[in-house]
Amino acid sequence: MSGQRPEPAGLYGSDASRSRQRRAFTGGAVPVAVYGLGKMGLPLAAVYADVCGNVTGVDIDADVVRAVDAGRCPVEGERGLPEAVDRLAGDGSLSATTDATAAASDAAVHVVIVPTLVEDDQPDLSALEAAVRSVGAGLDEGDLVVVESTVPPRTCRDRVRPWLAAESGLELGEFGLAFCPERTMSGRALEDIRGSHPKVVGGADAESTRVAELIYGEITDAEVIPVADCTTAECVKVFEGLYRDVNIALANELATLAGEFGVDVTDAIDVANTQPFCDIHTPGPGVGGHCIPYYPYFVISEFEGETPLLQTARHVNESMPTFTVESAADALAERGRDLADSTVAVFGLTYRPGVDETRASPGVAVAEELADRAETVYAVDPVCTSAPPEGVERVSLDAIGARELDLAVVTTAHDEFAEIPWTAFEDLVVFDGRRMLDDGDTSHPVSRLGDGVDQN
């Protein structure tokens, strides 16, 4: 925002009219700090900056901070984000720093969106604690703290609120606290933040909910849904991931039975889903990314109640890379060849098409297992920038046609794989774990995950 900024003002506990508070926020009189400038944090900071023109982004990575301050986008693969960062840094709406406490001292709204990792099936809240304690050290009366990081239910009540109080010497009522879960997908974060889905807000008290609803009413064009409290909002986010993990596990378990059924399970699922009360997901070689594989442990590990369904779903989904390798080995054996003597190409290391993310990726797990069982393993992925697993050689899509292959395993449905040079290979067996190949795409024999129809 160019020109002189208005005098800073807080919204929590303000007796100004709603319209005046909205104008203060959108006019830059309510300084905002966003803690965490990663794949979700930087897009969120950019949208906040676009709306209010007065945002400081905070990150522990000095290279990230320098890039953002210079108008360069350190996050790849997000449509429109490089242009937004360039414009917003250029006009002064967005700046960045590594000094979280200094940023907190200047801000009236604090948005925390740092990662929650899972180590040994236990949620690791150390990044959240560090960020929140830094916020607390600079917290003033009238400030609102918003947590967007996905966390176990009760985190705001049992951890964030005490951390803030301990560092600031203030109590809830002097400051506000709300949980407002991010509901975005990599590759389309700006679009999602601005209005693809309703925004959920839940405060530690009624005033926190009110202010969060006011703020996000300006951030998003979608509906803003206030819920009873922070814990309810935390549950909303976690439940979304749990639903998908359990549903995918159902689809995957059905896929493992396809041979016994003697049917194409995916065809049956598609037709079952024409009934409005059925919504079975699509089977695949596993569940990857930084969300769905981890959220079940926010419940399994944090609460004393029994969770047999969540644990079973995790077991099923974690077993799918091995099932994929076994199925591919069976397809080879049907043609008189042994996986141990074969050269294999794995097409896809990232967990999603078009997104450079390999955390918990089934493609990586499949490549690792094949490296232990096959003679030679190549990995082809036009999106992935990470190194392949040990024992796996990276080969470009342009170069793979010059290699002699016995088996191709498709684990990610990248658009670029429409250009796989199938005609360059002789006597190749294909296992399609993502059902991306149509009849006629290749003359080689193709086995598909979940297809139990006898091809003989």
Image: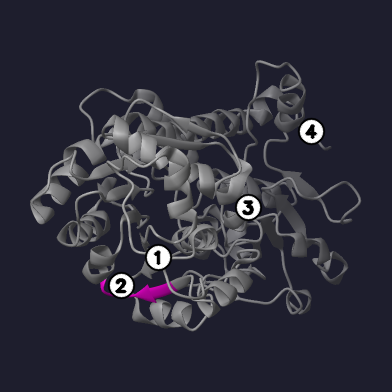
Q: Are marks 3 and 2 in contact (CB under 8 Å)?
A: no
Query: Which residue is at the front of the view, 265 or 122?
Result: 122
Q: Residue at x 51, y 65 (%)?
A: 371
For residue 145, above or below residue 306: below
Side of 197 relative to 177 (left or right): right
Question: Which of label 2 and label 1 is nearer to you?
Answer: 1
- Looking at the picture, how far across and down is residue 252, in whole percent? 58, 34
SS state under label 4: loop
Mark positioned earlier in the residue sequence (4 or 1) = 1
Identify the residue under disc 1: 6
Disc ID at residue 60: 2
**Residue 323 part of the magenta-drawn span:** no
Above or below for 233 versus 114: above
Mark 4 = which residue? 454
Q: CA distance from mark 2 to mark 1?
A: 29 Å
| Front label number (4 vs 2) | 2
Q: Residues within 10 Å of mark 4 (few under 14, many from 20)?
A: few
Q: Which residue is mark 3?
A: 191
Closest to the camera, between mark 3 and mark 2, is 3
